[in-house]
Structure formats: C-alpha cells, structure tokens
Amino acid sequence: MNERFVKHATFVIERMYAASPERVYQAWSDPVAKAKWYSKPDIFEFRVGGREYSSGGPPEGPVFTFDAIYQELVPEQRIVYTYTLDSDGTRISVSITTVELIQMEGGTKLIFTEQGAFFDGHDTPEVREHGTNIMLDTLGKVLEGEA
C-alpha cells in the first residue's frame, strides 16, 4: 500500500491590473469572459452556494476536474470559493480560495490567497502556485486586450 499523507500550505499572489475592480470582477463572474483566461466551465452558477464545474485536459494527458462552490461574493470586492481538484478521478487537493479586489490609483490590486490540502504527492503547493501565476498573468493579458 502506498503511503498516504496530506501537505497543507497557503500561498498569496498579488497582481496590479490597469482595469477597474468592476471590470476585474466581471472577468471572474461572467462565464464567457472567464473562459478567455480559465477553462470553459461545464456548469457556472456565480452566486453564493452556486457551483462551477469543469473537466478536461490535453489529449494525451490526464483529465482534470475542477469542482467549486462559491461561499461569499461581494461585488467588485471579494470572491471566496472552495474547490476540489481531481486528476483522472483521483482527488489531488481540496482548497479554499479568496480573491480580493482593491481599487488603487490606475486600476485594481488583486490579492489571491489559496489555502490547500494536497494529497499523497499527486500535487504540490509549488506546482499549484506556479499554475496560478500563469492563470493570473493570462487574466492580465485578457484585461489588457492582448489575449
């Protein structure tokens, strides 16, 4: 039997976007806008208690399944959701994520905080943080009209 273990970790990523908090919030809250920088959701219910679900991956790679429930939404200010991530049907992590949007001169400061439990070495906080950095960079490109 393989050794079972859980690695707990928290990471925080900050970004400045030259867009209003309303525009950044809209990029998270509208399924068409979100699909430009994140995976296209199969289910998208952007409301407290609502679900976001997507499943897919590269043709030759594993199928990743993201299954989230929105816990708190404060328009133009805060998004909080919990989610599970599976790889080919194996649960690899459970997380709580907080996205804070702070109006600043010239745009919006986004603070992304993820607190996760990563299971049995299938995923690591370092890999997740790296992927989240790429995701937030892509969001920035979309907000700037480059993507």
Image (spheres, rainbow, N blue to C red):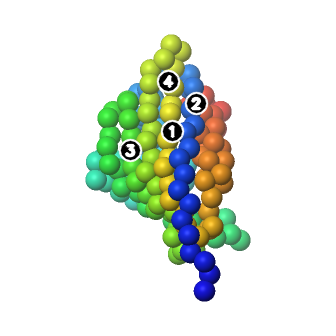
The image quarter in which residue 143 lies: top right
Badge 2 or badge 3: first in the primary sequence: 2
Badge 2 or badge 4: first in the primary sequence: 2
**Helix, strand or loop for disc 3:** strand
Residue 15 tag number: 2
> In front: 140, or 82?
82
User: For the residues marked 2 and 1, what is the alpha-carbon distance in whole angstroms?
Assistant: 8 Å
**Helix, strand or loop for disc 1:** strand
The residue at the point 58 percent across, 30 percent down is: 15
**x, y percent for residue 134:** 65, 44
- Quick one: label 3, few (<14), some, or many (20+) residues within 10 Å? some
The residue at the point 56 percent across, 75 percent down is: 4
Badge 3 or badge 1: first in the primary sequence: 3
**x, y percent for residue 147:** 64, 38
> In front: 3, or 63?
3
| Marks 2 and 1 close (CB-CB < 8 Å) | yes
Residue under numbered circle 3: 80
| Marks 1 and 4 close (CB-CB < 8 Å) | no
Residue under numbered circle 4: 108
Residue under numbered circle 1: 112
The residue at the point 48 percent across, 49 percent down is: 115
User: For the residues marked 2 and 4, what is the alpha-carbon distance in whole angstroms?
Assistant: 8 Å
